[in-house]
Amino acid sequence: MCHQRWALHVVIKRKLFYIYFNNKAKHHALNDLVARAMVSAGIPVSKEPQCLSRSNGKRPDGLSLIPWRAGKPFTWDVTVVCLLADSYVAAAAAREAGSVSELAADRKSTKYTNLDTRYTFKPVAVETLCPINDSARYFLSNLGHKISLQ
C-alpha cells in the first residue's frame, strides 16, 4: 500500500517536471492528474463545477460527486507558483523549500473562505521546482491509499 502512495507522488513530480512549458500548462496537467487519480480511486468528479463559483465568477478546479469525508464532497483548486515572482521572492528568501507553496495554499484557502460549508476545500499548491504544500501532500497520500484499495 505504501508503494502505491509513493508511486502516485513520484508520478505527480515527474509529470510536473516534464511539462516545462509554463505555469498554465503545469496547472492544467496537475489538475487533470488529480481528477484522473480521483476517478482511479472510484470517486467521480466534475471539473470546474458551475455550482461553486465565487463572487468574481471564478470557481474551483474540481469537485467530487460523492462525499469524500464527513459526508461532504471534496473540492480542490490547483495553483502552480514561481519562486521568482515578485510576490514570493521575499517569502522564498526568508524560509526553507516549500514555504512558497504553503503561502500560495494559504492565499488560495483565503479566496475560498466563503465557499459553502457543505464542501471540503483543499488547495493544491506546487512550486515550479516541485515542493507541494503539506495539506495537498496529505490529500494525495490518502488518494493513493484509496487507489491501492481498488
Image (spheres, grey):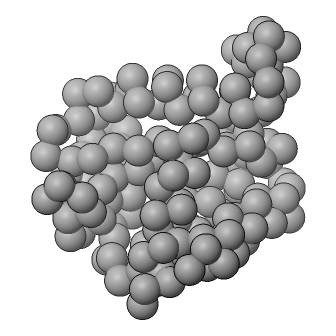
Q: Image quadrant for the N terminus?
A: bottom right
Q: How many numbered marks, from 0 up?
A: 0
Q: Position of residue 64 (x, y in %)?
A: 29, 65
Q: Is residue 129 left or right of residue 6?
A: right
Q: Residue at x 65, y 33 (%)?
A: 101
Q: Residue at x 41, y 30 (%)?
A: 109
Q: Is residue 78 above or below residue 142?
A: above
Q: Is residue 117 above or below residue 99?
A: below
Residue at the extreme bottom of the image, as rendered? 150
Q: Position of residue 104 (x, y in %)?
A: 58, 28
Looking at this view, is 125 or 133 the one in front? 133
Residue at the extreme front of the image, as rendered? 2
Q: Is residue 99 above or below residue 24?
A: above
Q: Is residue 47 left or right of residue 55?
A: right
Q: Is residue 137 left or right of residue 44?
A: right
Q: Is residue 68 left or right of residue 62?
A: left
Q: Image quadrant for the C terminus?
A: bottom left
Q: Position of residue 115 (x, y in %)?
A: 23, 35
Q: Is residue 31 visible?
A: yes
Q: Residue at x 57, y 51 (%)?
A: 137
Q: Is residue 19 visible?
A: no
Looking at this view, is 6 or 18 the one in front? 6
Q: Is residue 75 above or below residue 105?
A: below
Tell me the quarter of the picture where residue 49 sits: bottom left
Tell me the quarter of the picture where residue 125 sits: top right
Q: Residue at x 48, y 73 (%)?
A: 145
Q: Position of residue 123 (x, y in %)?
A: 47, 42
